[in-house]
Image (spheres, helix red, strand yellow):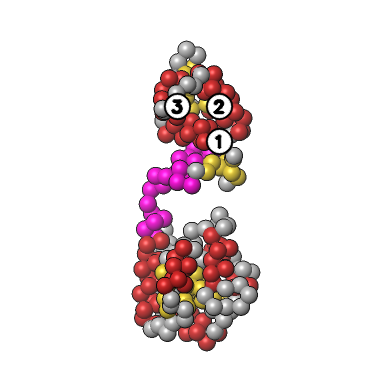
Amino acid sequence: MVKQTPRILVVDDEEDLCEILKFNLETEGYEVDTAFSGEEALTLDLASYDLLLLDVMMGEISGFKLASMLRKEEKTAHLPIIFLTAKDTENDMLTGFNLGADDYISKPFSIRQVQARVKAVLRRSLEQKKKPTENVLQYKTLQLDIERIKATIDGTEIALTKKEFEILKLLLENINHVFSREEILSRVWKDEVYVLDRTIDVNITRLRKKIGEYGKNIVTRLGFGYCFEG
């Protein structure tokens, strides 16, 4: 397998600084592009980059504003970001990290410092990608993101209630295992005082409809209970 060269985008309205960073990062073996404003950066395929270096103080779209926009989009929500800025107050740093920054470098800085920080962030990002997706349950194109409490089919989100989500989670964690109504009650409704068996049936029926073609995988075993057949 061919090793992919990490792609970096430097966004800064100081064109000379962009070129200096581009040259020095390319000598480290990275593929580097530049943009001289947040507006210009937004014309690019930002999801294709492995790391963004964002200047905080730019024109209408500041580095903070651009980062906030990226965090709201699914394709760029987890894109590593390093802020480059002359602002080094504690509040500014906290703003950066609250926006999900991976690092924050105050100007003036040495090129060696930037190279070291870039290397560290890219290494962490690669390790994160290599981690097993223990927080994601998947069956074909049906995916359950446990951490974000999100269900999708072919990337399209499905609106599930809390109980529907928990039932589907239980079934996907134990594909082909038959759960009795009593087991589902004890695992999903837990300490809730009074729940009818019929409540489970209603939730299962709604769940089947919401997950479309995968509804047929939730099978009723008469006299026993329910299972998700893989």
* Tags 3 and 1 touching, CB below 8 Å: no
Residue at x 52%, y 26% (from the top left corner):
218
In primary-sequence order, the first of circles 2 and 3 is 3
Specify the segment rendered in magenta: 126-148
**Up/down of 15 relative to 55, above or below:** below
Q: Amino acid at mark 1?
A: Thr
Label whose residue precedes the other's in the sequence (1 or 2): 1
Label at residue 15: none
Q: Does residue 93 show up?
A: yes
Residue 21, how many percent across, how many down? 46, 81
Left-right relation of 37 to 79? right
Q: Residues within 10 Å of mark 3 (few under 14, many from 20)?
A: few
For residue 192, the mark is 3
User: Residue at the spot x=49%, y=41% of the render?
Assistant: 144
* SS assignment at label 3: loop
Looking at the image, tell me whether mark 3 or mark 1 is earlier in sequence order: 1
Quadrant the N terminus occupies? bottom left
Contact between labelled residues 2 and 1, with CB atoms less than 8 Å apart: yes
- Give the residue displayed 45% in from the left and 27% down from the top: 192
125 shown above or below 14: above
Residue that mark 1 sits on? 161
Q: CA distance from mark 3 to mark 1?
A: 16 Å
Residue at mark 2: 203
SS under mark 1: loop
Asked whether residue 168 is in view, the answer is: no
User: In x, y percent, where is residue 53?
Assistant: 48, 73
- The residue nearer to you, when weighing 200 against 215, is 200
Q: Is residue 146 magenta?
A: yes
**Looking at the picture, does residue 99 appear above or below residue 21?**
above
